[in-house]
Image: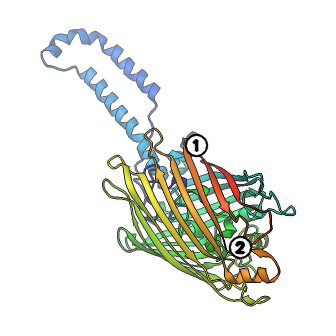
Amino acid sequence: MFSDIDSNARLPVRPAGAPSTGRATQLRVRRLPVRPLLLVNLAALLCATPQLHAADQQTAQGGSDPVVDAVNRTQIANDAALSRAPAEQAARWANLMPRGFNLSLPPPSETILPEAGGLRDKLADYGIGWFGMNVTSAANNLLSGSAKSLHGQRQYNGQTFTYVDNLYMGVTYDLAQHGIPDGQIYLAGMFTRTNWAPMGPNKFGLSEASYYQTLFNKRLEVKLGYLISTWEFINTNVGGSLSTSVFGASGSIPIQGGYSNNATPTPGIVLKYNINKNWYAKATAERAVNPDGLTKEIHENPTSFKFTTVNSGALYIGELGYQRNPSEGVAQEWIRGGAAYNTSSYNSFENLGTRVGHNSWYYLLADRQLWQKSPAGSPGRGLYIGASVMYAPPYANAVSQYYELRLYAKGIFDSRPYDMISLVATDTVWGRDAMNYYASKGSLVHRDSMAITLSYSARVTRGVYAGIGLGYVNHPTSIVYQTGTGSALNLLGNLNIFF
């Protein structure tokens, strides 16, 4: 959901997937009060006035007035300090952002509360930082001929007006002040409200509790605790948050395969090995989300503090990636692929009424910059193309295949350097075993669901992003449908506020 800010041109943040650069300089330049300085300088000039006339001849002959020189030197030093302070403050705050994620987050200077009345700077004195966001999205089908509901049951996102609102807040504590370079403790919680459970469901509880550390000269990154897989692996949001599956989070292959999101953190450990500047390998061993879905997981573990839930097992993910950041004449590129193995007990579509004690899924994604709008000044601005392929075996998965092709542009208008346009086409293919099961019960089934979405995301002001989109979906329901369901033309909108 955060891809509309995943642009090197738009946000001056550490590139996604790169190792932490360590603690920023410990020198703290305080913002000097401008008004008192001007009064002091004015008083000095007034006091020096009687001497200025007497010194005119000497000054004209190439001499200098020590009082005037002293005042000028003071003013120059003050101006320099004032010009340095904001940049150094911003770097100091950014160093306290949560570490290790594979997606970019807006730095504190790009939020609605950059200084927070001085609170951010005061907390930074103690190594404390925070990151907060409120993300709201909504969808509504515009086609009057499509069935708005089936016996009162909503079957897809936007069938009737659908919304989800996520409030997220996290606090970091920097351990470098205790002699542990790059060490960071991170604690976050969230509150979710939605009118359709597959988009949530409703929850108030833990989102992440982790410890991050680098080793071997930053070659190895380690994170352990209650973690969010969606912010550590794959990053499916590059093309724009409005182009996500119409079936909600539960419809994606990684989510049905036990992949945790920021509403369902699970205990585990993540290791990332930075092979060189561009290549990396990343792996995790963690408790899988309940195999019966996100709703079941949150029902059994509403606060997210439980170590395990019924039928859940371990999830192992391995990812290999190549990531190159843009520079003048060098296009941005990110290729990542991986596999996952899950030891949870899944309902079997192959042998009905039984459970199978394993599951797996595989993925390959690639994104590349085709053209740079401003190679020298903002190399991340330009035109991009991307594609995704995912697979999960049909014996335990309703969604067996997923294909995506995306074309998107970042900051192509000089007057709107932070905006993004995306065109995304997707095909969600259902598992043959699940189709056979529902067909045997006399239900109408279809093979896949295809969609195409056009969206525009705009930076409204510092820390506020809004998006609007239009998505056409053929076969908008899941496997089972009823006559008269029709297609969907969803009007999509979102509002992201960072603080």
**Dot 2 alpha-carbon crowd within 10 angstroms: few under 14, some 14 to 19, many 20 or more:** some
Q: Residues within 10 Å of mark 1 (few under 14, many from 20)?
A: some
Picture coordinates of residue 381, whole percent (x, y): 42, 50
Q: Residue at x 56, y 73 (%)?
A: 224
Name the residue carrying label 1: 112
Tell me the quadrant of the picture where the N terminus can be found. bottom right
When the figure is inspected, residue 166 is found, relative to residue 478, above or below; the finding is above
Residue 471 image-quadrant placement: bottom right
Relative to 28, say whether 245 is above or below: below
Residue 60 left/right relative to 231: left
Residue occupying the point 46% across, 54% down: 7
Q: What amino acid type should be assigned to the residue bearing mark 1?
A: Ile
Residue 228, given in percent of the width and then of the height, sits at 60, 68
> To which residue does mark 2 refer?
446
Residue positioned 51% across, 49% down in the render = 420
In the displayed orientation, state which residue is furthest to the left: 61
Visible residue check, residue 120: yes
